[in-house]
Image (cartoon, helix red, strand yellow):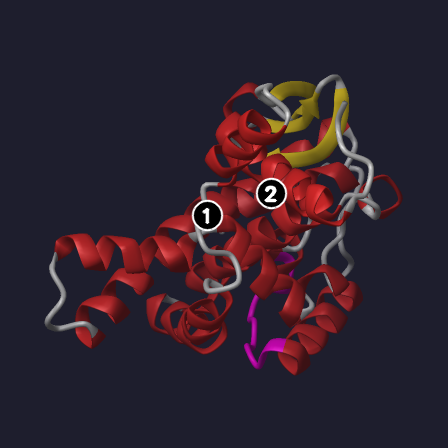
Amino acid sequence: MRWLDSLLSGCGWRRTEEDSEDLRLVFLRKFGTKFKDGRLLGTALTHRSFLNPAEADISNERLEFLGDSVLGLVATDCLFRSMDDADEGALTKARSRIVNKSVLGKIGLDLGILDVLKYARDEIKEDERALLTLSADALEAVIGAVYLDRGFEAAFRFVEDNIIAAANDTSAEHSQTDYKSRLQEICQAEFKVQPQYKVVKRMGPEHRKIFHLEVLIRGKAYGSGTGRSKKEAEQQAAGQAMRRLESDSIRPR
């Protein structure tokens, strides 16, 4: 773990050995996974929003990158073995349901990943979409940390025990409905206008932008969304707008 040692040395914030030990015990009780290196687990559970700019390099982003690949491999392996009659297209669709960020975020929230994640709670606590993204990213970072700490077999078990089965249940709740198309059809039929999508804010570095958008109907905001791409954020905003239109007695004029 030389790269981790170099990142932790000399930085203004670090977990003490006691902190690391406490975190390992908490994580073991909550997730049933034992860590040898508490500092590695601590890094996986530290979001860049918790750190000052000089410490940003010790956030969980590198581990998230690794965990995303490990998750994809484990999901592919499990599906290949369990769906022995499925063709490539069916396997690809099944895998996309497991690695979907919204599904992962919901699983992470259900598991309580944010209870042990260090992040800017006061800034993000009211943003449900941002919390969902934080949850998904932290879960992937933990997968990457398990892989480094205990090897592929342990990472495989972690994903299989905590994600695969839960994803099958959760994905039904987060089906890939084309909310944008449906909202456009409603707006054209009922209001004779098209919804307009407006970028409100961009966060993060260029290679990891998070977009915050609003959807406007005749100039009035009817929904908002957050995502790693404008397309993802637009879908979330459109879905929120549709739910509001269904329950709101005040319609666009």
Q: Earlier in the sequence, mark 1 or mark 2?
A: 1
Residue nearest the observer in this picture, 148 or 202: 202
Position above or below: 233 against 107: above
Residue nearest the observer in this picture, 63 or 89: 89
Instruction: Answer with left or right where residue 126 lies relative to residue 46.
Output: right
Check if mark 1's residue and mark 2's residue have beta carbons within 8 Å.
yes
Q: Residue 89: x, y in percent?
A: 17, 52
Residue appearing at x 50%, y 24% in the figure: 207
Q: Is residue 36 magenta?
A: yes
Displayed quadrant of residue 109: bottom right
Q: In the rendered structure, which amino acid carries the disc numbered 2?
A: Gly
Q: In the rendered structure, which amino acid carries the disc numbered 1?
A: Thr
Q: Give SS at disc 2.
A: helix
Q: Residue 91: x, y in percent?
A: 21, 59
Numbered tag placed on residue 239 in the rendering: 2
In the current view of this chain or complex, which residue is farthest to the right? Answer: 122
Q: Give SS at disc 1.
A: loop
Residue interval drawn in magenta: 31-39
* Disc 1 target residue: 177
Residue appearing at x 25%, y 68% in the figure: 79
Q: Residue 67: x, y in percent?
A: 44, 53
Q: Main secondary structure of the magenta part?
A: loop
The C terminus, quarter of image? top right
Residue 201 appearing in the image:
no
Residue nearest the observer in this picture, 199 or 203: 199
